[in-house]
Image (cartoon, rainbow, N blue to C red):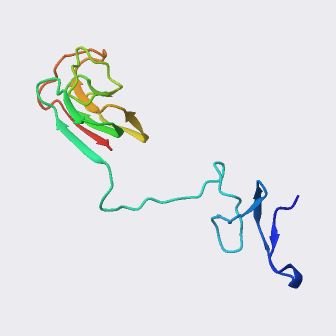
């Protein structure tokens, strides 16, 4: 069944694309990309509309920056629900260090709390852990930087072992 509508049918008017939903016709608009006069297909998951991001001066991510102290560096990054979009770091120590992110509104207790995400910073290697869709934290975003991989490791790093940056909202 054709769902299109002919405008000014008696005088040979144009046909307009429509979609009949429950007896009501909704006009279909052609979203395409390409040169004038072409149709590269309906925009869909398999044929997405290309988009570009442009810089703006407000509304971006917040940044947390930490040069490690001689401790576990336990701290609250955000005391309310949020999302982490990236963890970046560089480790100058001769051993790996571990950045642990917790779903907490307050500073974590690395010896008792379980991290939501652990990011390894290998010795002498830069780490860029980008999370395009964001990692959700329901209660808050907290951090610790320790020497051990175990979830409850509480081994302090040395001062200036690493630098860590967290992109969050």
Up-down: is 32 above or below 125? below
Question: What number of labels is visible?
Answer: 0
Q: Quadrant of the C terminus?
A: top left
**Would residue 13 appear left or right of 72 to someone viewing this image?**
right
**Would residue 3 appear left or right of 156 to someone viewing this image?**
right
**Would residue 94 appear left or right of 27 to someone viewing this image?**
left
Where is residue 142, by image quadrant? top left
Up-down: is 70 above or below 53? above
- The residue drawn where x is 32% and y is 23% is 115
- The residue drawn where x is 29% and y is 33% is 140
Up-down: is 52 above or below 79? below
Residue 95 in view: yes
- Residue 34: percent from left, percent from top: 64, 67
Where is residue 164, by image quadrant? top left
- Residue 122: percent from left, percent from top: 29, 27
Q: Quadrant of the N terminus?
A: bottom right
- Residue 106: percent from left, percent from top: 22, 29
Residue 92 in view: no
- The residue drawn where x is 86% and y is 79% is 9
């Amino acid at each position: 069944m054709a769902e299109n509508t002919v405008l000014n049918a008696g005088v040979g008017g144009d046909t307009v694309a429509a979609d009949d939903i429950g007896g009501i016709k909704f006009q279909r608009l052609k979203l395409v990309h390409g040169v004038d006069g072409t149709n590269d297909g309906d925009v869909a998951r398999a044929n997405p509309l290309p988009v570009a991001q442009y810089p703006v001066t407000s509304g971006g991510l917040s940044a947390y920056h930490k040069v490690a102290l001689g401790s576990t560096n336990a701290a609250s990054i955000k005391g309310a629900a949020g999302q982490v979009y990236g963890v970046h770091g560089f480790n100058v120590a001769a051993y790996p260090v571990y950045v642990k992110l917790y779903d907490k509104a307050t500073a974590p207790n690395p010896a008792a709390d379980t991290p939501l995400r652990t990011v390894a910073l290998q010795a002498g290697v830069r780490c860029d852990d980008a999370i395009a869709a964001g990692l959700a934290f329901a209660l808050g975003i907290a951090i610790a930087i320790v020497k051990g991989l175990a979830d409850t490791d509480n081994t302090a790093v040395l001062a200036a072992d690493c630098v860590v940056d967290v992109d969050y909202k």
